[in-house]
Image (spheres, rainbow, N blue to C red):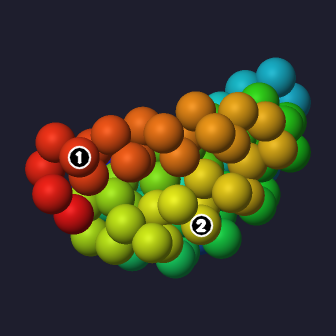
Amino acid sequence: VHLLLYEKNNVNEAENICAGILITSKDTCFREIAEKIANLDIESGVLACKKVNATIEQDNCYYNIAQTARQRNITRALEICDMRKEDILDCRELIEKYCEIYTC
């Protein structure tokens, strides 16, 4: 799946592979795709997180994308933290500490 994203930049094909795998691994697969997409386009990564069904995996997806976004747009990173269902404050605190250290 990662090879499709890196070499061919084919998100649809990668998502089709995720859709066909076992339920227990499907959410992890979609989360990993979303995180890779976010490296290039934060908003597309956020949209891809919505395909993750398991709450914990989806929260991890938003958390990791927020960490990626903090270097580009601190306000958007905090908004992404707010999309989480749990541990919103932990996510926001980490973003804010980053700003204290690196002056956002």
Crowd class of label 2 (few under 14; some 14 to 19; many from 20; radius 10 Å): some
Residue 71 location (% of width, % of height): 24, 60
Whether 82 is drawn above or below 32: the answer is below
| SS assignment at label 2 | helix
- Closer to the camera, 68 or 79? 79
Residue 98 can be seen in this image: yes
Q: CA distance from mark 1 to mark 2?
A: 18 Å
Residue behind mark 1: 100
Corner quadrant of residue 50: bottom right
Q: Residue at x 16, y 42 (%)?
A: 101
Helix, strand or loop status at disc 1 = helix
Q: Which residue is mark 2?
A: 79
Q: Do the numbered discs 1 and 2 sit on residues whose CB atoms are within 8 Å?
A: no
Foreground disc of the pair 1, 2:
1
Q: Residue at x 34, y 58 (%)?
A: 70
Give the residue furthest to the top. Answer: 24
Q: Is residue 4 left or right of residue 104?
A: right
Residue depicted at 23% across the width and 46% down the height: 100
Can residue 32 be seen from the camera position used here? Answer: no
Three-letter amino acid code of the residue under disc 1: Glu
User: Residue 7: image x %, image y %?
Assistant: 25, 59
In the image shown, does 48 or 55 lie closer to the viewer? Answer: 55
For the view shown, which residue lies furthest in the left direction? 102
| Image: 11 above or below 21 | below
Quarter of the image containing the C terminus? bottom left
| 4 sits left or right of 27 in the view | left
Q: Residue furthest front?
A: 100
- Given the image, on which type of amino acid does mark 2 rest? Glu
Q: Which mark is residue 82?
A: none
Q: Nearer the viewer, residue 21 or 70?
A: 70
Question: Residue at left 68%, top 42%?
Answer: 88
How busy is the neighbourhood of tag 1: few (under 14 within 10 Å), some, or many (20 plus)? few
